[in-house]
Image (cartoon, rainbow, N blue to C red):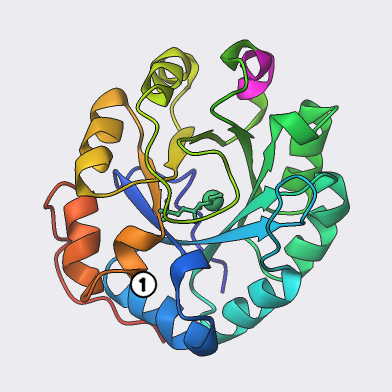
C-alpha cells in the first residue's frame, strides 16, 4: 500500500510532525504509535552525525524499524549530517517518505533534491538560524518543503528563537501551492501560534509532545486547539 505523502497532498494545515528525539528510546515503537494515535501527522526523525552537529542520534535502522511497525506512517527524516548525499539511498530503502537536508551541508542542493525525488521521497531544504536566507532562495523551487530551524540544531528542549520569524516571512511568499514551510525547535503551544501566524504549515515538536503527560491535548494545542474528528487507529 502506498503511503499518502501529506507533504504534497492538499492541506491538512498545520501538519504536526512529532520528533521522536524526546521519546523514550526504550519504548520507541509504542511511543511513535501513541503520537500518531494522538493526532500527529508525521514522525520526524532527527539524524545527527557528530560532525554537522556535535550530537549523535539515529540512522536508517531506526527508520526501518518504525516503517515495519507502523507501515502507514509518513517518516520525515531530518538529516543533520555533513554528507547528506550519502544517505539518500539508505533512507529510501529504510522506508522514509520525506528527506530534508541542510543548505549548509549541500554544495549542489538542486541536484541532491532531484536525487531524493528520484528515490521516491519528497525533498526538503533546511536553513539554520545563523545562515543568511539569501543562500536558500535560488533552490526553494526545487523542493517540496523548506525547513526553518528555530534553534541551532543538535538537541531537543532549546528555546525558540523569535528572530527566525523574519526568515519565515521572507520565504513564505516565494512558496507555491503544494510546498510546505516547516519550523523546528522550541515549538510549544505559544510559539506554534506565532509560527502559524507567520505562515508555517508544518510544525515539528519533540519536548512539547513527548514531555507532556498526555499527547493528544498537547498536539491539539500545537494546532491551535483544533482537535481532528474521529479516533485515529494505526494498524
Ligand atoms: C533539533 C532537532 C529538533 C528537535 C526539536 O536539532 O532538529 O527536531 O528534536 O526539539 P524541541 O521540540 O524539544 O525543541
Ligand atoms: Zn528536526
Q: Which residue is mark 1?
A: 36
Looking at the image, residue 67 lies above or below residue 39: below
The kind of secondary structure element at disc 1 is: helix
Residue 63, image quadrant: bottom right
Q: Quadrant of the N terminus?
A: bottom right
Q: Position of residue 172 (x, y in %)?
A: 42, 20
At x 43%, y 24%, the residue is 164
Q: Is residue 56 left or right of residue 205?
A: right
Q: Position of residue 231 (x, y in %)?
A: 20, 77
Q: Main secondary structure of the magenta part?
A: helix
At x 77%, y 29%, the residue is 109
Q: Position of residue 26 (x, y in %)?
A: 53, 88
Q: Position of residue 107 (x, y in %)?
A: 85, 27
Q: In terms of depth relative to the viewer, which is nearer, 187 or 38?
A: 187
Q: In terms of depth relative to the viewer, which is nearer, 193 or 4?
A: 193
At x 78%, y 68%, the residue is 93
Look at the image and give the residue range highlighted in magenta. Answer: 135-141
Amino acid at each position: 500500500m502506498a503511503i499518502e505523502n501529506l507533504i504534497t497532498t492538499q492541506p491538512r494545515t498545520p501538519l504536526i510532525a512529532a520528533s521522536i528525539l524526546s521519546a523514550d528510546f526504550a519504548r520507541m515503537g509504542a511511543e511513535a504509535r501513541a503520537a500518531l494515535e494522538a493526532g500527529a501527522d508525521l514522525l520526524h526523525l532527527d539524524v545527527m552525525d557528530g560532525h554537522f552537529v556535535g550530537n549523535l542520534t539515529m540512522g536508517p535502522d531506526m527508520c526501518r524499524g518504525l516503517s515495519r511497525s507502523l507501515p502507514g506512517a509518513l517518516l520525515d527524516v531530518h538529516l543533520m549530517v555533513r554528507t547528506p548525499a550519502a544517505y539518500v539511498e539508505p533512507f529510501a530503502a529504510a522506508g522514509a517518505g520525506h528527506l530534508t537536508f541542510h543548505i549548509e551541508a549541500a554544495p549542489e542542493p538542486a541536484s541532491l533534491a532531484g536525487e531524493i525525488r528520484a528515490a521516491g521521497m519528497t525533498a526538503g531544504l533546511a536553513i539554520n538560524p545563523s545562515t543568511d536566507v539569501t543562500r536558500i532562495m535560488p533552490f526553494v523551487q526545487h523542493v517540496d518543503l523548506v525547513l526553518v530551524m528555530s534553534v541551532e540544531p543538535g538537541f531537543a528542549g532549546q528555546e525558540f528563537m523569535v528572530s527566525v520569524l523574519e526568515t519565515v516571512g521572507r520565504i513564505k511568499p516565494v512558496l507555491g501551492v503544494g510546498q510546505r514551510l516547516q519550523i523546528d525547535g522550541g515549538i510549544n503551544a505559544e510559539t506554534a501560534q506565532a509560527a502559524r501566524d507567520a505562515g508555517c504549515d508544518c510544525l515539528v515538536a519533540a519536548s512539547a509532545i513527548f514531555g507532556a503527560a498526555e499527547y493528544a491535548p498537547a498536539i491539539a494545542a500545537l494546532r491551535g486547539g483544533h482537535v481532528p474528528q474521529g479516533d485515529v487507529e494505526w494498524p
